[in-house]
Amino acid sequence: MSVKTRFAPSPTGYLHVGGARTALYSWLHAKANDGEFVLRIEDTDLERSTPEAVEAILDGMRWLQLDWNEGPIYQTHRFDRYKEVIQQLVDEEKAYPCFCSRERLDELRETQMNNKQKPRYDGKCRGLSLSEMDLSRDHVIRFKNPVEGNVTFKDVVKGEVTFANSELDDLIIARTDGSPTYNFTVVVDDWDMGITQVVRGDDHLNNTPRQINIFASLGAKAPEFGHVPMILGDDGKKLSKRHGAVSVMQYRDDGYLPQAVLNYLVRLGWSHGDQEVFSVSEMIELFDINHINKAPSAFNTTKLNWLNQQYIKNLPVDELMPHLNWHLQQAGLNINDGPAIEALIPEFAERVQTLKDLVEIIRPYYSDFDAFEEKAAKKHLRPVAKEPLERVNQKLTALTEWRPDSIHKAINDAAEELSVGMGKVGMPLRVAVTGAGMSPSLDITLEWVGRDRTLARIQKALAYIQDRVEGS
Ligand code: GLU
């Protein structure tokens, strides 16, 4: 049978890293087997589902480039189908109307709790015959779960798992208003869509035996299940907002590349030897659903940062640019007004871990800055720097060609004429021109900043020194 997987988020919030990881594993399993991947929006909880959350999830999937062959399929569009199957189960006496009142169920629960029993429905309405029923009264529909025996399945991640049917009660599959419930809609969908493998968080493990029983009652083959352990924060607690960004789109905003995030997520619970860096095509080639780790993994921002830097350094420029452009735009930086960005990227990629930082570090080459970095200015734009700056200004102004070799010579000449070391000219010049104490070699830096901007900034630095003198 050809492989078909799905990602089935409930649109009650953004796409978080845990969801993105199960989506990635399902997507990879489909891709690795020339199969198909379905995106299904589980929006039957009308109170908690929002169109904004649907958009946020779709945005996250698109940003990660986890494309789907079918969907998005909305469960709210499939109510007729669910009703039809519920009716079928009732007709076949595999499900039944239950008229028990909330009060009765609450009381039952309380008694069971007091007796230290697991709260469960006691099956009062299970045996009612049609003649004993008044269907005009409020009722739910319950699934007749087998009372005896076990449900055993081989979880792709956890191995063999067994639940006793005596632990499971008759689950409500349709509410009083007729709307179907989660465990039921999932089964009908996975069945109708021909899903072969389900990868999901292990918070769903307890639902699986119930779902397997429903599959069986429909005469349908259940898919294989793989329940992945949760992601922990670096403090060992369940990953949550407290640990920083957990929304996938927040990672975009913070300057991460989708390739790096995917690479990070695939390793968070799966490995192939000790390889750390995987391109998407390598992931597709090497991913094996049977090698997902059983143990929970902890989120490690340092590692994500390292990976992000690898991708910034090594991605071909045409793959990097769409993402960098987005950040340039956010930062209001126009790169048409400055040097070719392809030249700057390799020079600065070594020094940054995010695209956001990359934009900031290249800013002086494309736009004027408001202020010199305080520490660098305090150290290097002092009265002693006035003469070297004036001299180098003269030399640079006199240049007929703005090229690294001529710029280098101008700086050298200024230092020689003043009988000082290169640093005495170079450092004030660097801070004057870039605003900061660190940059690539000065000849290249000045070439990139350009003649007009360089000369104007030297004047600004001289004015700054003057202000210091007058202020002191
Ligand atoms: N809609 C469920 C959730 O978001 C997932 C159900 C499933 O994958 O079976 O938790």
Image: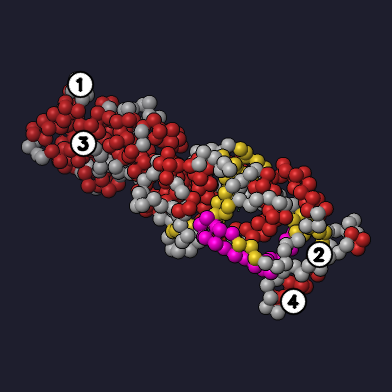
- Type of residue at label 1? Glu
Q: Residues within 10 Å of mark 3 (few under 14, many from 20)?
A: few
Q: Mark 4 points at which residue?
A: 111
- Type of residue at label 2? Arg
Relative to 382, say whether 182 is above or below: below
Magenta segment: 153-172
Q: Which of 453 and 463 is in front in this view?
A: 453
Q: Nearer the viewer, residue 136 or 399?
A: 136
Question: Does any atom of ligand 1 lie closer than 8 Å to the CB of label 3?
Answer: no
Q: How far apart are marks 4 and 3 (CA)?
A: 79 Å
Q: Position of residue 141 (x, y in %)?
A: 79, 57
Camera-nearest label, 4 or 2 = 2
Q: Which of 470 and 136 is in front in this view?
A: 136
Q: Where is residue 306 in the image (x, y as percent from the top left)?
A: 35, 48
Whichever of labels 2 and 1 marks the residue nearer the N terminus, that label is 2
Q: Distance between the residues labelled 4 and 1?
A: 92 Å
Q: Mark 2 points at which residue?
A: 126
Q: Name the residue under label 1.
A: 401
Quadrant of the rendered image containing residue 389: top left
**What residue do we see at 43% from left, 33% from top?**
322
Disc sitting over residue 441 in the figure: 3
Q: Is mark 4 on a helix, strand or loop?
A: helix
Q: How far apart are marks 2 and 3 (CA)?
A: 82 Å
Taking the magenta stretch, the answer to whether it contains residue 155 is yes
